Image (cartoon, grey):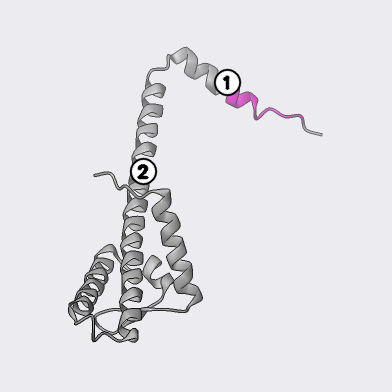
Amino acid sequence: MKINFTKEHYAKMKELAVAMLVANETIVTKFGQHLNIVELMHTQTISTLNSIRLGIAKQIDDLEKQDEWAATEYQQVKLENLKRAKELVNLIIGWKRYNIELAEAKSKKAELEAQLKELKESQKTPDEKIKELEEQLKSFDSEEF
C-alpha cells in the first residue's frame, strides 16, 4: 500500500508542530502521561499514536455531544485544541508511515543494485577481469624519493 503523505500534509504538520512547541503544549495520554512535540514525533510508535488519536477523538465526541447552548467558552476552546491535537497526531502517523515506506524502498533499491553489480561482475570475461586487476596494480606503483 502506497502512503499518500504529500508536501501539503508535511507543511501542515510542521505548522501544527511549531505552534505546539511555541505554546509549550502537551498531549495527555489515557494514562495521564504528558507528551511534548518531540516525544510525539520521535519516541512514540504508530500504535501508541493511534491509541492517542482515538482517545482524543473520544474526548472530541464527548464534548460535541454536550448541549451546545450550555457549553462554556472554556469547553469551546478545549474542543478546538483537541481537534488541532487530533489532526497533528494523525499527520505524525502519516509522516511516520511515509518514512517507513521510504526506508523500505531505499533498502530494496540497494538490494537490487547489489544484485545488478553481482550479475554484471559474473558476466565479465577473464580478459576483462585481468585488465581490471592490472589497472588496480598500476595504481600502487609510485616513485619513491
Helix or strand or loop: what does disc 2 sit on?
A: helix
Q: Residue at x 19, y 78 (%)?
A: 62
Name which quarter of the figure residue 59 lies in.
Answer: bottom left
User: Against 119, is 114 above or below?
Assistant: below
User: Start and end of the magenta stretch?
Assistant: 135-143
Instruction: Choose between 20 and 68: the one closer to the eye.
Output: 68
Q: Residue at x 42, y 59 (%)?
A: 12
Query: What's under tag 1, amino acid-wise?
Result: Glu
Dot placed on the residue nearer the N-terminal end, 1 or 2: 2
User: Against 17, is 74 above or below?
Assistant: below
Dot label at residue 107: 2
Instruction: Choose between 102 and 119: the one closer to the eye.
Output: 102
Name which quarter of the figure residue 47 lies in.
Answer: bottom left
Which corner quadrant holds the C terminus?
top right
Q: Which residue is mark 1?
A: 134
Query: What's under tag 2, amino acid-wise?
Result: Ser
In the rendered image, residue 117 lying in the magenta stretch gets the answer no
> Label 1 to label 2, Cα distance in Å?
34 Å
Helix or strand or loop: what does disc 1 sit on?
A: helix
Residue 94, image x, y percentages: 32, 56
Residue 106, image x, y percentages: 38, 42
In the rendered image, residue 141 lying in the magenta stretch gets the answer yes
The reply, left or right, for residue 121 in relation to residue 89 is: right
User: Against 133, is 60 above or below?
Assistant: below
